[in-house]
Every structure is written in C-alpha cells, then in structure tokens.
Image (cartoon, rainbow, N blue to C red):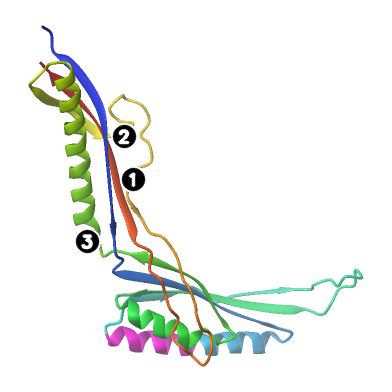
Amino acid sequence: MRDVIITVRGDHQTRVAPEEAVARLTIRTEGGERTDVMGRATDAASMLRAALTARQDAGEIREWSTGRLAVRSERPWNSEGKQLPLVHHASLDVSATFANLDALSGWLGEIAELDAIQVDGVQWMLTDATRSAVEADVAAQAVRIAMTRATAYAAALGLAEVTAVEVADVGLLGGGAAGAAPGPSPRMMMAASSMDSGAPLELQPAEIVVSAAVEARFSAH
C-alpha cells in the first residue's frame, strides 16, 4: 500500500502575566502668548524628566524617551464665522518603560492631576527573554498538536507509522502567501478608581496572549 500523505494544522496559545509596562504621555499647552505656551510646556517637560530620571535611578524605570517639542499656531473661527485671535499650541510626546508595575500606579496617580500632562495609554509587555522562551514553547506545543492530529487520522485509516515530512508557518506549506504571524498580543487596559490628591491609580494589567499556528505534512503507512 502506498504511503498516505496527511496535512494538518496545529494551534496553541498561552496567557502570561505582564512583566513591564510602557506608559505613553503627551505634554500639551495652549494660549494666546507663544512665549507663555512654550514656557509652560518646557517647565512641565523639565519636571517630568526629573521625575523619570529619579525613578530610573531607583530601578523602577528601564528606559524613557521624549520627542521634540512641537509648536503650532492657528486662528480659530467662532460660530458666527468670525476669525478669533491667534492661539498657540505646544506638545511633547513622552514614553517610559516601567519594570516595576506598582511604581507605575503610584507615578500615574501623581501626574494625573497635572493640567499640562495627558496620559495616552499603557501597553503591557513581557521582557525579551520571557517573550522568546514563551514563543518557543508555544510553537513547540503547536507542532505536538499537529503530530497528535496526524497520528489520529492515520489510526482511523488503520495506519500505524507516521513520519513528519514538512512543517511550516501557516500559509507557507502550500506555497501561498504567508498569513500574519501569530505572536505576542499586548493588550491595553487602564482602570482608574480615583483621581484625587495624587492617589495611586488601580491598574488592571491584561494578560498577554502568545499564540502560534503551524501547518505540517506527514507520511503514514
């Protein structure tokens, strides 16, 4: 009897508690005097840099960065179609990677009441080492599931020996375009229970889903 070729797909995913968090902030100021607007933005940036540097020195922040201060001006219109006096806007993007999630909660509580600073979001992450290890394990589990399915198909056909012929990411085995590679899927969630007097924000870190899918071809006889 000729060998039977069996082609299957294996999928696996796991959920891992985040180890790091990237907080993204924007400093925004506006007003009728350009010098005043830039001054308030610069003061807020200096205060924020000092706070971030102190927390980095304490080991709570792994790294942080700021963009370039952007300034623009516009003459808005009112509801009657009349052009209003010139308004100046200044903005600066800030990003900080926290290795200590408890410290992140306290820091966000401190800055939440500052008018010039807007919290844009929090992205939960794994360290590079953990992510690599989890991805390798999930991929291996997906291959084992594919092998189990192929073995089950072979047994149903009365075949006892199954040998792997090809294994590939989804979309590659048939020579077609590769699909989107499954991988870490950081999710964002930030729940605030209090915004008063610099109280710590209660953050709810979402588990990170790491998934993998493979296609495999086996020969059975």
Name the residue: 22% across, 44% down: 139
Of the numbered discs 2 and 1, the one sitting upstream in the chain is 2
What residue occupies the far bottom of the structure in this picture? 197
Residue range highlighted in magenta: 45-58
Indicate the position of residue 136 as horizontal and vertical percent values.
19, 49
Gap in Å between the C-alphas at discs 3 and 2? 24 Å
* Mark 1, residue position: 182
The structure residue drawn at horizontal position 47% and vertical position 90%, both measured from the top left corner, is 47
Count residues near mark 1 (Cα–Cα under 10 Å), then give few for <14, some for 14-19, many for 20+: some
Q: Nearer the viewer, residue 177 or 75?
A: 177
Q: Quadrant of residue 3?
A: top left
The Cα atoms of the two marked residues, 3 and 1, are separated by: 16 Å
Q: Quadrant of the C terminus?
A: top left
Residue matched to label 3: 130
Give amino acid for label 3: Thr
Q: Earlier in the sequence, mark 3 or mark 2?
A: 3
Q: Amino acid at mark 2?
A: Val
Quick check: marks 2 and 1 in contact, CB under 8 Å? yes
Judging from the image, what secondary structure is the residue with disc 1 in?
Answer: loop
Left or right side of 158 for 32: right
Q: Identify the image quadrant of the N terminus.
A: top left
Of residues 173 and 16, the one drawn nearer to the viewer in this rendering: 16
Magenta stretch secondary structure, dominant: helix
The residue carrying mark 2 is 170
Secondary structure under the numbered disc 2 in the rendered image: loop
Identify whether 168 is placed above or below 134.
above
Magenta stretch: residue 17 in it? no
Whether the magenta-drawn stretch holds residue 47 is answered as: yes
Name the outermost residue toward the right: 80
Say which amino acid is labelled 1: Pro
